[in-house]
Image (tube, coloured by chain):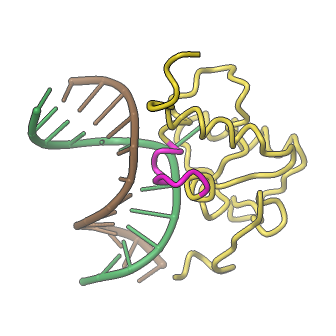
Chain colours: A yellow, B green, C brown
Amino acid sequence: MKQMSDGVRLYSRIYAVIRRIPKGRVSTYGTVAEMLGCGARQVGYAMAALPDGSAVPWHRVVNFRGGISIPGGTGITQRLKLEAEGVRFSQRGTVDLSARGWPRARKKSRKKAHR
DNA sequence: CTCTTGACGAAAC
DNA sequence: TGTTTCGCCAAGA
């Protein structure tokens, strides 16, 4: 390993955290970003940069509402993968972060994103 | 090098 | 309640 120290890629840290998400659980971009100390947007951007077939369980990462923010068929795939792990989606298409969230669900409001 | 966009999130309007 | 703006960091044009 050479290029690390002063220039450790932020993505590497993001992937490392996501890889620690246990099966049947989901995490959010904001949560991961917060534990990394960077912007939530970068987490999502890192996922978009993930190569197909990577060891990172990117499908366990959803947005702060517990919903999928991924456009296209990739988002559909994510939902199918989560359901295959035992994750249930509400009628609104969201996951209960209080129950399946990781490391700790941080639910802000149970109603429709009413802040 | 500058400007825009993005698999986000929160606040302002 | 939905739309718009700003912040975050990185990549593409």
Q: Where is residue A10 shown, x and y percent of the image?
A: 50, 37
In this image, A35 relative to A56: left or right?
left
Numbered circles on residues, count: 0
Picture quarter with the N terminus of chain A: top right
| Residue ID at (82%, 59%) | A100
Question: Does the magenta stretch mainly form a helix, a strand or a loop?
Answer: helix
Q: Quadrant of residue A81?
A: top right
Q: In the drawing, does residue A68 fall left or right of residue A41?
A: right
Nearest the viewer among A15 and A5 is: A5
Which residue occupies the extreme right position in the image? Answer: A86
Say whether residue A47 is magenta: no
Up/down of A5 relative to B11, above or below = above
What residue is shown at x 87% (from left), y 48% (from top)? A24
Q: Is residue C10 left or right of residue A100?
A: left
Residue A68 picture location, percent across and down: 62, 51
Q: Is residue A39 above or below residue A104?
A: above
Q: Work out whether residue A32 or residue A91 is closer to the camera in this orientation and state it.
A: A32
Residue A56 quadrant: top right
Place of residue A96 in the rendered image (x, y in percent of width and height, measured from the top left): 77, 65
Q: Which residues are magenta?
A: A35-44
Quarter of the figure with residue A77: top right
Q: Is residue A38 magenta?
A: yes
Residue A93, horizontal then vertical, whole percent: 69, 59
